[in-house]
Image (cartoon, rainbow, N blue to C red):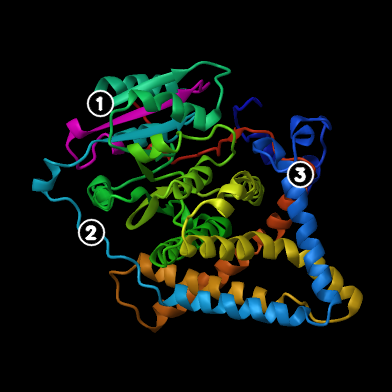
C-alpha cells in the first residue's frame, strides 16, 4: 500500500498558486500502480477514472455545441435543476431536539472525543482545557489525543495536562507510523468505549454545552452521524478569512436543506460525531484517501445511515490566512471530493440508496464538480464559434442559488437577532464579497480534474499549520 504520512506545509508558503499547480503536473513515477491496474477497479484506478470523466465532460460539451438541439438539452437541464433549487429554498429543516436536561444526563450515552495532533503547541492546550470541562458527566465522556510524533512542545504539553485531567488519554505515535490522520484515528478507536465517537481538529473551539445539544440528535435510530456547523474563529483578519466565513455559512445552508429533502448530509472533519455501531459497520476510517471525512460520508450513506446537522452551537476553527495556503487546502478538498465518487461509483449506481439521495448526488456532482470543469471547453467553443456560452443558464442558476444560500446561511447564524435595513444591506455585502471569494473554485475544480487524470496526489494527510493566539498557548 502507498505510504501515508503527515507533512507540514511550511515549505508551501514559499510557493505561489501557479508555481504549485505546475509542479504538481510533474510525475517521476510514470509507471505507478494506478496506471497498471485494471480499468475502473478499486482505489488503484483513480487516474484512469479521472481521465475518463475529463474526456467525457469535454466530449459532451463539444458535441452539444455542434448539434442543433444542444441548446434545448441545456434548457431542459436548467429547468430540472431550477425546480430542485426551489425545493431547496423552500425546504424546512427538521426541528432540532431540546438539549439534554439534568435528569436526561443520568441516562445519556457515553462519548469518546478523538483528536489527531502533530506540532500543535500553539492551540492544543486550549483545546484540552475546553474539552475536559464540558457540561457533561465526566464519567460519561473521555478524551483521546494522538500525538503523531510531534517535534515541538506538543508531547510535553499533553503529558502535563494528562496529570491534570483524568479523562484525558494521550497516545504518542512513533516516527514512520502509517495511515496519517486516518491511521491515528483507527489506532485509538479500539481503546475507546464511547457509544458516540467525536472527532475534532487541534484548533477547534467549542462551547461547554456542545455534547448536551448534539447527543439528542442520535435519538433517531437511523442517524449514523452528526456534523456540527463550522465557524471561522479569525474571520475579521482579512479578505480570505472573511470569505471562508461566508463559505461556511453557505455550506450550512446546503447541509440543512439537502437533509430536509432526504438528500446527502456530509461530514466536515472538525466537529463530526459518529455512532459507534455505524463506524464499525463502515470499517472505520479509510487510510487510502486524503479526505477521511468525505470518504466516511459516502460509506455511511451506502450503508443506509443518515447524517444529521447541528446549526447551533458551532465549532470554531482557524481559517487559512493567505491565498497560497487556501490554494493548497482547497486542492486537497477538491481531490478528496472527487476520490469518493471515483472509488464508490459502482456502489452508488447499484446500491439502493433511495431516489432522494441519488438525485441529490447527481445535482451536486453536476453543479459543484462537473460544471466548473465543463466551463473550459464551453469557453473554447464560444470563442471559436462566436456564440454565447452554452452553459450560461446552468452557470447563472448555480451562482444565483449560491448567493441566496450564502445570504440565508449568514442570516440563520444570527437567528436570535432582529434585522433592520442596515443589517440586510450588511448581509448582502458579505454575500457579494463571499461570491467573489468563491470564484477560486472555478479555477481549482478544472485544474484538479485535469491533474488527477495525469497524476493523482500520493496518499498523505497534509496538516494545516495553526497559529493560535497568545492567550491560547498553554503556559503550564
Characterize the local packing of mark 3: few (<14), some (14-19) or many (20 or more) Cα atoms within 10 angstroms: many
Name the image quarter holding the N terminus: top right
Tell me whether the residue at label 3 lies in contact with that at label 2, contact meaning CB atoms closer than 8 angstroms: no
The disc, 2 or 1, on the residue closer to the chain's N-terminal end is: 2
Task: Say which quarter of the image contains residue 454.
Answer: top right
Tell me if 340 is positioned left or right of 103 in this view: right
Left or right of 91: which side holds 85? right
Report whether 137 appears left or right of 404: left
SS class of the residue under badge 3?
helix
Indicate whether 371 appears above or below 202: below
Q: Quadrant of the C terminus?
A: top left
In the image shown, does 474 or 98 lie closer to the viewer?
98
User: Which residues are the magenta region?
Assistant: 130-152
Determine the secondary structure under disc 2: loop
* x, y percent for residue 114: 38, 33
Write down the residue under mark 1. 165
Q: Which residue is mark 3?
A: 48
Amino acid at each position: 500500500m502507498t505510504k501515508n504520512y503527515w507533512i507540514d506545509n511550511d515549505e508551501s508558503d514559499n510557493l505561489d498558486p501557479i508555481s504549485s499547480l505546475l509542479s504538481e503536473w510533474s510525475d517521476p513515477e510514470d509507471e505507478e500502480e494506478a496506471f497498471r491496474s485494471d480499468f475502473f477497479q478499486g482505489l488503484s484506478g483513480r487516474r484512469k477514472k479521472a481521465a475518463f470523466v475529463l474526456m467525457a465532460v469535454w466530449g459532451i460539451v463539444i458535441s452539444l455545441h455542434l448539434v442543433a438541439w444542444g441548446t434545448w438539452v441545456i434548457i431542459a437541464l436548467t429547468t430540472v435543476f431550477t425546480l430542485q433549487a426551489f425545493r431547496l429554498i423552500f425546504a424546512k429543516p427538521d426541528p432540532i431536539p431540546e438539549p439534554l436536561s439534568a435528569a436526561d444526563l443520568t441516562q445519556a450515552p457515553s462519548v469518546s472525543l478523538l483528536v489527531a495532533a502533530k506540532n500543535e503547541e500553539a492551540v492544543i492546550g486550549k483545546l484540552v482545557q475546553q474539552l475536559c470541562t464540558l457540561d457533561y458527566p465526566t464519567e460519561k465522556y473521555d478524551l483521546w489525543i494522538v500525538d503523531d510524533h510531534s517535534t515541538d512542545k506538543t508531547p510535553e504539553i499533553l503529558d502535563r495536562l494528562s496529570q491534570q485531567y483524568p479523562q484525558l488519554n494521550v497516545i504518542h505515535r512513533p516516527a514512520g507510523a502509517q495511515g496519517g490522520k486516518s491511521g491515528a484515528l483507527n489506532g485509538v478507536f479500539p481503546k475507546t468505549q464511547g457509544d458516540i465517537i467525536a472527532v475534532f481538529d487541534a484548533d477547534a473551539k467549542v462551547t461547554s454545552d456542545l455534547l448536551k445539544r448534539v447527543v439528542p440528535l442520535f435519538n433517531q435510530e437511523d442517524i449514523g452521524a452528526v456534523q456540527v456547523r463550522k465557524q471561522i474563529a479569525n474571520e475579521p483578519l482579512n479578505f480570505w478569512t472573511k470569505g471562508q466565513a461566508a463559505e461556511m455559512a453557505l455550506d450550512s445552508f446546503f447541509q440543512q436543506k439537502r437533509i430536509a429533502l432526504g438528500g446527502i448530509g456530509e461530514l466536515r472533519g472538525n466537529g463530526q460525531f459518529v455512532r459507534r455501531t455505524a463506524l464499525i459497520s463502515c470499517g472505520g476510517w479509510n487510510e487510502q484517501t486524503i479526505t477521511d471525512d468525505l470518504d466516511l460520508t459516502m460509506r455511511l450513506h451506502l450503508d443506509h445511515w443518515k447524517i444529521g446537522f447541528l446549526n447551533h452551537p458551532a465549532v470554531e476553527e482557524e481559517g487559512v490566512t493567505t491565498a497560497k495556503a487556501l490554494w493548497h487546502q482547497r486542492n486537497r478538498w477538491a481531490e478528496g471530493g472527487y476520490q469518493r465518487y471515483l472509488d464508490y461509483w459502482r456502489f452508488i449506481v447499484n446500491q439502493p440508496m433511495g431516489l432522494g439521495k441519488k438525485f441529490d448526488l447527481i445535482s451536486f456532482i453536476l453543479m459543484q464538480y462537473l460544471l466548473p470543469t465543463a466551463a473550459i471547453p464551453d469557453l473554447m467553443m464560444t470563442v471559436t464559434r462566436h456564440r454565447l456560452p452554452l452553459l450560461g443558464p446552468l452557470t447563472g442558476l448555480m451562482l444565483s442559488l449560491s448567493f441566496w444560500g450564502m445570504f440565508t446561511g449568514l442570516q440563520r447564524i444570527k437567528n436570535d437577532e432582529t434585522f433592520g435595513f442596515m443589517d440586510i444591506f450588511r448581509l448582502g455585502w458579505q454575500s457579494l464579497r463571499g461570491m467573489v471569494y468563491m470564484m477560486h473554485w472555478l479555477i481549482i475544480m478544472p485544474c484538479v480534474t485535469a491533474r488527477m487524470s495525469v497524476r493523482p496526489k500520493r496518499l498523505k494527510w497534509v496538516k494545516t499549520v495553526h497559529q493560535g493566539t497568545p492567550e491560547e498557548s498553554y503556559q503550564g
